[in-house]
Image (cartoon, rainbow, N blue to C red):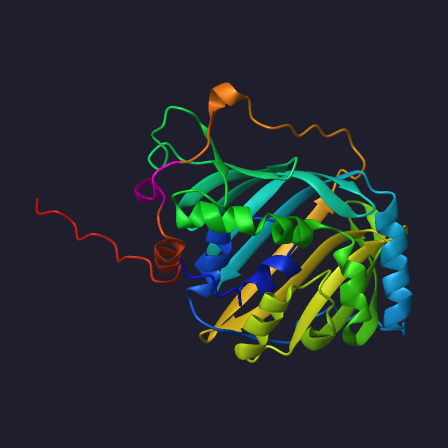
Amino acid sequence: MRTTTVAMGISRWALAAGSLMTIAALSACGSTSSSPNTTSSLTATTLTSAELASKLEAGSTNLTSAHLTLSSKVGDRSVLTAQGDETLADGKVTAMRLNEQAGTIKLTILLVDGGVYLKLPSNLNQSGKPWVKATTESSSPVLRQLAASASSIGQSASLSQYKSLAEAARSLKVVGTERVNGAAVTHYSLTVDVAKVPSTAFTQATKTALEKAGVTEIPEDLWVDENGRPVKGSNRFILNGQVVTSAFTISRLNQPVTITVPPASQLVISISAARLPLASKVGASVCNPAPPAPASAA
């Protein structure tokens, strides 16, 4: 399985907490470079990176749960949509349930009690049990990679990461005040220096992959409420000459959320690698979809 995680830059910045299928589905298309975001025409004011970082840190401290939505496109073609819930402590994910569609693959990912669980389409899991646990001993390389990456998946979805990203901003401005879900929020535009992002936000492997692809900075727009909580974000990259856009929203803050391990009666520990497609093949179907079948003769 191809694990070059250039596209993790897209997934992380969009708060993607999804599977390595999602990451590889984008990275299989090729290397990326950053592209400036288009922002609104509101009058900009000044703010330091340290001030924004402090605001974001304070905002994430008291969060206990959130609802996430995510979308990513290559050109006009959707490559990822996702929505789900997570629980948090001090801004860090403690459990998460996410429903994804990456290319043609629909799945549910569950992170709870240090484990990674997947609910796969029936054609990929014919065990008779809906849930599969990903372990480092799984026969499937995709499941092994998911298990090994559990910490980074949770890290990607942790709201506390935005403090670190703000601190690494090469440039930052306040675009203006806007409204999201009926509430007044502040729109920030920042360009983050990849080399300055600490390991709490980007692993060294991610930084290396981004740098090898020539991505040294990442443009990002963030919308932050009056309590310092990010409620919306967007970014864009150039991928093989095509524009890749991603966006996320965060809502239902501190609402009751319960996430538990699937019951044993619905769980299989491993399935044959033959029943789970290689992520590179998933990526190829996303980046180079097959042409439509010719119409049959009348």
Q: Position of residue 205 (x, y in %)?
A: 58, 67
Residue 38 visible in image: no
Report if residue 273 lies within the magenta region: yes
Q: Is residue 297 left or right of residue 174?
A: left
Q: Nearer the viewer, residue 133 or 88?
A: 133
Residue at 51% x, 57% y: name it.
Answer: 23
Q: Nearer the viewer, residue 120 or 188?
A: 120
Q: Position of residue 288 (x, y in %)?
A: 34, 62
Q: Above or below — where is 283 with respect to 33?
A: above
Residue at 59% x, 48% y: name it.
Answer: 150
Residue at 74% x, 67% y: name it.
Answer: 198
Q: Is residue 153 left or right of residue 31?
A: right
Residue 216 visible in image: yes
Q: Above or below — where is 36 with respect to 97?
A: below
Q: Position of residue 159 (x, y in %)?
A: 76, 51
Q: Position of residue 185 (x, y in %)?
A: 84, 55
Furthest residue in direction left, as rendered:
298
Q: Above or below — where is 177 with respect to 84?
A: below
Quarter of the picture containing the N terminus is bottom left
Furthest residue in direction front, as rendered:
137
Q: Above or below — where is 115 with respect to 216?
A: above
Looking at the rendered structure, the number of numbered marks drawn on it comes to: 0
Magenta residues, as a range? 271-276
Q: Nearer the viewer, residue 200 or 242?
A: 200
Report if residue 34 lies within the magenta region: no
Residue at 42% x, 66% y: name it.
Answer: 29
Quarter of the picture containing the C terminus is top left
